[in-house]
Image (spheres, rainbow, N blue to C red):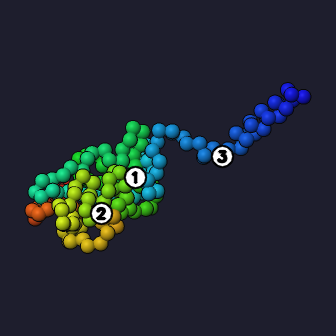
Amino acid sequence: MKRSGSLIIAALACCMIAAIPRHAVPRHPTTPPPIDGIRCEGMEGAVVHIHQYLALYDGYQRVTVPALIGIHNDCLYWLHTHTADGLIHDEVPIHKFFKLGNFFDVWKQPLNWYQAGPLHARPGTKLKITVDGKPFKGNPRNIELDNHTEIIIKSGPPYVTHPPHYNWGNMG
Protein backbone atom coordinates (compact mmCIF):
# COMPACT_ATOMS: atom_id res chain seq x y z
CA MET A 1 0.00 0.00 0.00
CA LYS A 2 2.90 2.29 0.75
CA ARG A 3 4.22 1.86 -2.77
CA SER A 4 0.89 2.62 -4.50
CA GLY A 5 0.53 5.78 -2.36
CA SER A 6 3.91 6.96 -3.59
CA LEU A 7 2.89 6.28 -7.18
CA ILE A 8 -0.29 8.32 -6.73
CA ILE A 9 1.67 11.25 -5.29
CA ALA A 10 4.20 11.06 -8.16
CA ALA A 11 1.38 10.94 -10.72
CA LEU A 12 -0.31 13.98 -9.14
CA ALA A 13 2.98 15.91 -9.16
CA CYS A 14 3.47 15.15 -12.87
CA CYS A 15 -0.09 16.31 -13.65
CA MET A 16 0.44 19.54 -11.71
CA ILE A 17 3.69 20.30 -13.54
CA ALA A 18 2.10 19.52 -16.91
CA ALA A 19 -0.79 21.90 -16.08
CA ILE A 20 1.52 24.93 -15.66
CA PRO A 21 0.97 27.21 -18.69
CA ARG A 22 4.02 27.39 -20.93
CA HIS A 23 3.99 31.19 -20.95
CA ALA A 24 4.57 31.15 -17.18
CA VAL A 25 8.09 29.84 -17.74
CA PRO A 26 10.43 32.51 -19.17
CA ARG A 27 11.98 31.65 -22.54
CA HIS A 28 15.29 33.32 -21.70
CA PRO A 29 16.04 33.43 -17.99
CA THR A 30 18.73 36.09 -18.60
CA THR A 31 16.35 38.50 -20.37
CA PRO A 32 15.69 41.49 -18.10
CA PRO A 33 12.07 42.13 -17.05
CA PRO A 34 9.94 44.81 -18.72
CA ILE A 35 10.32 48.38 -17.42
CA ASP A 36 7.21 50.58 -17.63
CA GLY A 37 5.78 48.00 -20.06
CA ILE A 38 8.86 48.33 -22.29
CA ARG A 39 10.21 44.90 -23.13
CA CYS A 40 13.76 43.85 -23.89
CA GLU A 41 13.64 41.84 -27.11
CA GLY A 42 16.05 40.13 -29.46
CA MET A 43 15.33 42.45 -32.40
CA GLU A 44 14.60 46.14 -32.80
CA GLY A 45 10.93 46.88 -33.40
CA ALA A 46 9.80 48.37 -36.71
CA VAL A 47 6.23 49.61 -36.16
CA VAL A 48 7.49 52.82 -34.49
CA HIS A 49 11.06 53.81 -35.34
CA ILE A 50 11.85 57.37 -34.24
CA HIS A 51 14.71 59.23 -32.55
CA GLN A 52 15.24 62.04 -30.03
CA TYR A 53 18.27 64.01 -28.92
CA LEU A 54 19.06 64.44 -25.21
CA ALA A 55 21.88 66.75 -24.11
CA LEU A 56 22.92 67.34 -20.50
CA TYR A 57 25.07 70.33 -19.49
CA ASP A 58 26.74 71.19 -16.20
CA GLY A 59 27.56 74.85 -16.72
CA TYR A 60 29.35 74.87 -20.08
CA GLN A 61 30.48 71.23 -19.81
CA ARG A 62 28.62 68.52 -21.69
CA VAL A 63 27.64 65.54 -19.50
CA THR A 64 27.65 62.25 -21.39
CA VAL A 65 24.51 60.26 -21.97
CA PRO A 66 26.15 56.82 -22.13
CA ALA A 67 26.15 54.42 -25.05
CA LEU A 68 24.31 51.12 -24.71
CA ILE A 69 21.56 52.28 -22.33
CA GLY A 70 18.86 49.61 -22.59
CA ILE A 71 21.05 47.17 -24.48
CA HIS A 72 21.90 43.84 -22.86
CA ASN A 73 23.74 40.75 -24.05
CA ASP A 74 20.79 39.16 -25.79
CA CYS A 75 18.21 41.94 -26.10
CA LEU A 76 17.41 45.64 -26.59
CA TYR A 77 14.76 47.60 -24.74
CA TRP A 78 12.44 49.48 -27.08
CA LEU A 79 14.06 52.71 -25.80
CA HIS A 80 17.85 52.60 -25.98
CA THR A 81 21.07 54.29 -27.07
CA HIS A 82 23.76 52.86 -29.30
CA THR A 83 26.30 55.67 -28.98
CA ALA A 84 27.29 58.27 -26.37
CA ASP A 85 26.09 61.24 -28.43
CA GLY A 86 22.67 61.62 -26.77
CA LEU A 87 20.66 60.01 -29.57
CA ILE A 88 17.73 58.02 -28.15
CA HIS A 89 16.28 55.27 -30.32
CA ASP A 90 12.59 54.30 -30.02
CA GLU A 91 12.29 51.04 -31.95
CA VAL A 92 8.96 49.58 -30.95
CA PRO A 93 7.15 46.51 -32.36
CA ILE A 94 3.71 47.97 -31.51
CA HIS A 95 2.06 51.36 -32.05
CA LYS A 96 3.12 52.98 -28.75
CA PHE A 97 4.94 56.18 -27.82
CA PHE A 98 6.86 57.00 -24.67
CA LYS A 99 7.95 59.85 -22.42
CA LEU A 100 11.35 60.96 -21.17
CA GLY A 101 10.61 59.42 -17.74
CA ASN A 102 10.35 56.01 -19.43
CA PHE A 103 13.81 56.44 -20.95
CA PHE A 104 15.30 57.41 -17.57
CA ASP A 105 13.62 54.36 -16.01
CA VAL A 106 15.27 52.10 -18.62
CA TRP A 107 18.53 53.95 -17.81
CA LYS A 108 17.82 53.31 -14.10
CA GLN A 109 18.44 56.98 -13.32
CA PRO A 110 16.29 59.60 -11.56
CA LEU A 111 14.62 62.42 -13.47
CA ASN A 112 13.13 65.43 -11.71
CA TRP A 113 13.75 69.18 -11.42
CA TYR A 114 16.84 68.60 -9.26
CA GLN A 115 18.47 65.61 -10.93
CA ALA A 116 18.61 64.15 -14.44
CA GLY A 117 20.75 61.02 -14.29
CA PRO A 118 24.29 62.12 -13.38
CA LEU A 119 23.38 65.83 -13.65
CA HIS A 120 22.47 67.63 -10.40
CA ALA A 121 21.03 71.12 -9.94
CA ARG A 122 23.22 73.48 -7.96
CA PRO A 123 22.11 74.20 -4.37
CA GLY A 124 19.09 76.50 -4.31
CA THR A 125 18.36 76.07 -8.03
CA LYS A 126 16.43 73.80 -10.36
CA LEU A 127 17.54 72.35 -13.65
CA LYS A 128 16.63 74.33 -16.78
CA ILE A 129 14.96 72.30 -19.51
CA THR A 130 14.21 73.19 -23.10
CA VAL A 131 12.27 71.07 -25.56
CA ASP A 132 12.80 71.97 -29.20
CA GLY A 133 14.30 75.30 -28.08
CA LYS A 134 11.36 76.31 -25.86
CA PRO A 135 11.52 76.45 -22.03
CA PHE A 136 9.74 73.49 -20.44
CA LYS A 137 7.82 74.06 -17.18
CA GLY A 138 5.89 70.81 -16.55
CA ASN A 139 6.99 67.52 -15.02
CA PRO A 140 10.19 66.51 -16.88
CA ARG A 141 9.13 62.85 -16.72
CA ASN A 142 6.16 63.75 -18.97
CA ILE A 143 8.15 65.16 -21.90
CA GLU A 144 6.81 63.34 -24.94
CA LEU A 145 9.34 61.55 -27.11
CA ASP A 146 8.25 62.59 -30.59
CA ASN A 147 10.38 62.15 -33.69
CA HIS A 148 13.41 64.48 -33.69
CA THR A 149 12.54 66.07 -30.33
CA GLU A 150 15.57 67.90 -28.91
CA ILE A 151 15.72 67.95 -25.11
CA ILE A 152 18.38 70.05 -23.39
CA ILE A 153 18.76 69.83 -19.60
CA LYS A 154 21.12 72.33 -17.96
CA SER A 155 22.55 72.87 -14.50
CA GLY A 156 23.99 76.22 -13.51
CA PRO A 157 24.70 79.04 -13.29
CA PRO A 158 26.47 79.50 -15.54
CA TYR A 159 24.17 78.04 -18.18
CA VAL A 160 25.23 77.18 -21.69
CA THR A 161 23.22 79.58 -23.86
CA HIS A 162 23.32 78.11 -27.37
CA PRO A 163 24.05 74.39 -27.29
CA PRO A 164 24.42 72.85 -30.73
CA HIS A 165 21.42 71.22 -32.36
CA TYR A 166 21.57 67.60 -33.42
CA ASN A 167 22.32 67.12 -37.11
CA TRP A 168 19.53 64.78 -38.19
CA GLY A 169 20.93 64.53 -41.72
CA ASN A 170 18.74 62.13 -43.64
CA MET A 171 17.69 60.18 -40.54
CA GLY A 172 13.95 59.47 -40.58
Classify 10 Å Cα crowding around label 3: few (below 14), some (14-19), many (20 and above).
Answer: few
Please, which residue is most extreme toward the front here? 123
Indicate the amino acid at tag 2: Asn
Side (left or right) of 26 relative to 171 = right
- 28 above or below 7? below
- 58 above or below 84? below
Q: Earlier in the sequence, mark 2 or mark 1?
A: 1
Q: Earlier in the sequence, mark 2 or mark 3?
A: 3
- Which percent across, then down, holds residue 86? 24, 53
**Distance from Cα at disc 2 to Cα at disc 1:** 22 Å
The residue under label 3 is 21
Which is closer to the viewer, label 1 or label 3? 3
Classify 10 Å Cα crowding around label 2: few (below 14), some (14-19), many (20 and above).
Answer: some
* Residue name at image x 36 percent, y 47 percent: 70
Side (left or right) of 41 relative to 113 = right
* Residue name at image x 77 percent, y 33 percent: 10
The residue under label 1 is 78
Q: Earlier in the sequence, mark 1 or mark 3?
A: 3
Please, which residue is most extreme toward the right here? 1
Q: Which mark is residue 112?
A: 2
Mark 3 element type:
loop
* Residue name at image x 78 percent, y 38 percent: 12
- Which percent across, then down, holds residue 155? 17, 61
**Distance from Cα at disc 1 to Cα at disc 3:** 26 Å
Side (left or right) of 116 relative to 90 = left
**Distance from Cα at disc 2 to Cα at disc 3:** 41 Å
- Which percent across, then down, holds residue 42? 44, 43
Q: Tell me if I can see residue 14 in this picture.
A: yes
Mark 1 element type:
loop
Indicate the amino acid at tag 1: Trp
